[in-house]
Amino acid sequence: MRRRPLLLAGLGLALAACGALGRPAKGNGLQALAAQRGLTWGSALSLAALDQPELLTLIQHNVGAITPENALKWDATEPEPGRFSFSDADRQLAYAKRNQMTVRGHALVWHRQLPGWLESLEPTPLRQALERHVQHVASHTRGRVISWDVVNEPLDEQGHGLRRSLWLEKLGPDYIADALRWARQADPKARLLINDYGLEGDDPQTARKRVSLLTLIDQLQRDGVPLDGIGLQAHLVAPREDEPRFATLPAFLQQLRQRGLAVEITELDVSDRELPSATALRDGRVAATYGAFLRAVLPEPALKQITTWGLSDRDTWLNGAFPRSDGLPQRPLPYDANLQAKPARSSIAATLQPTEAPR
Ligand code: G3I
């Protein structure tokens, strides 16, 4: 529990309710509950969602920040060399502004969703293309984006240093520092993050990946490279056995804070792909995983924002990427495909509620 006496929490709710915190009252929505802890609750926003009024109503009730799910990625913003296209992104940025929501930029440099023309470039023109892309996109969104996932998933999945991506192979590790510096030049006020997954659990691979990240951070900081925070994607998997504990996560977050870094949970969802078919069992285990994870991260003073990767199961990326063996659609998010609240939503709300009496 963050060090916030109940009285102040109540004041936070009152301010949130009257919109004094800069965002409209959201009643008992997840944003209002998060605001009691000085946090923002966000969601990824797909383009399709903009044409679903009932989903937008749910988003406006629960969310204080959005992340364009795909519209700010390289294949969307620069499909041809030097030809930029922001029509989809600007629709989502305009939606956020109309609804007093902040926006997370995602993602300037990634090894996926790259346009074909990029992959064949030799190192020098590739680095030139990277500089042009980062500076053009971050300039376009300047003042409209509160934070950027500048470099997405730079770490080797197994925890052995940096991912051997197109970027590392052709430009070497300096592509990370370069991208961060160019982003700072283009948008001096945005919070600049490195964003990655597989940093949440208590297993040896996660421990190795955390060491890789801390090693990268320490090198960047020795070199005076601008880095303001770390994004933990938190694509979690509900375990078949007992409830997950995330026992080692608080200490890792403290290591990030001790380096002066903000922490954002950037893509939270809980896959039920390993669970039996019964809906009630799946929903219960998913809810328990949300609760255990939030209990592990909410006390962290460096935590700024929690974003789920969608609000409703209807368009989760998980069904395409990690389908269940029984073919059933997954149920990873707070609301089901019919926009009905699930046990996960209750678990999130209950865990967000301040419980401590004033100290
Ligand atoms: O835009 C094309 C469209 O023109 C085409 O008709 C359609 C059918 O092929 O595909 C569309 O592109 C899809 C794109 O989403 C936009 O909808 C891609 O096929 C599809 O692969 C892509 O999936 C996205 C995925 O990243 C790509 O890796 C998911 O929506 C998105 O949720 C997911 O998000 C990532 C984060 O950015 C980074 N962290 C992991 C997370 C899950 O992979």
Image (tube, rainbow, N blue to C red):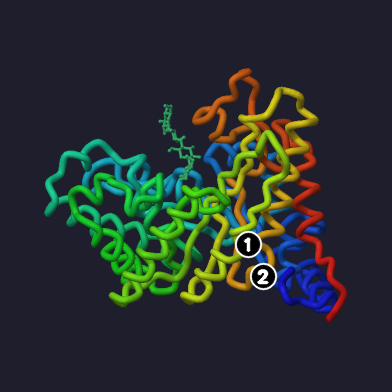
- Residue 242 vs residue 203: left or right? right
Q: CA distance from mark 2 to mark 1?
A: 7 Å
Q: Which residue is mark 2?
A: 22
- Residue 157's quadrant in the figure? top left
Of residue 78 and residue 279, the one placed in the foreground of this image is 279
Q: Residue at x 71, y 72 (%)?
A: 2
Of residue 34 and residue 201, the one placed in the foreground of this image is 201
- Residue 17 vs residue 304: left or right? right
Q: Local crowd at mark 2 within 10 Å, few (<14), some, or many (≥20)?
A: few
Horizontal and vertical percent position of residue 290: 70, 48
Q: Of the residues shown, which amino acid type is indicated by label 2?
A: Gly
- Residue 142's quadrant in the figure? bottom left
The quadrant in which the C terminus is found is bottom right
Q: Secondary structure at mark 2?
A: loop
Rendered position, 355 above or below 42: below
Q: Which residue is mark 1?
A: 100
Horizontal and vertical percent position of residue 289: 70, 45
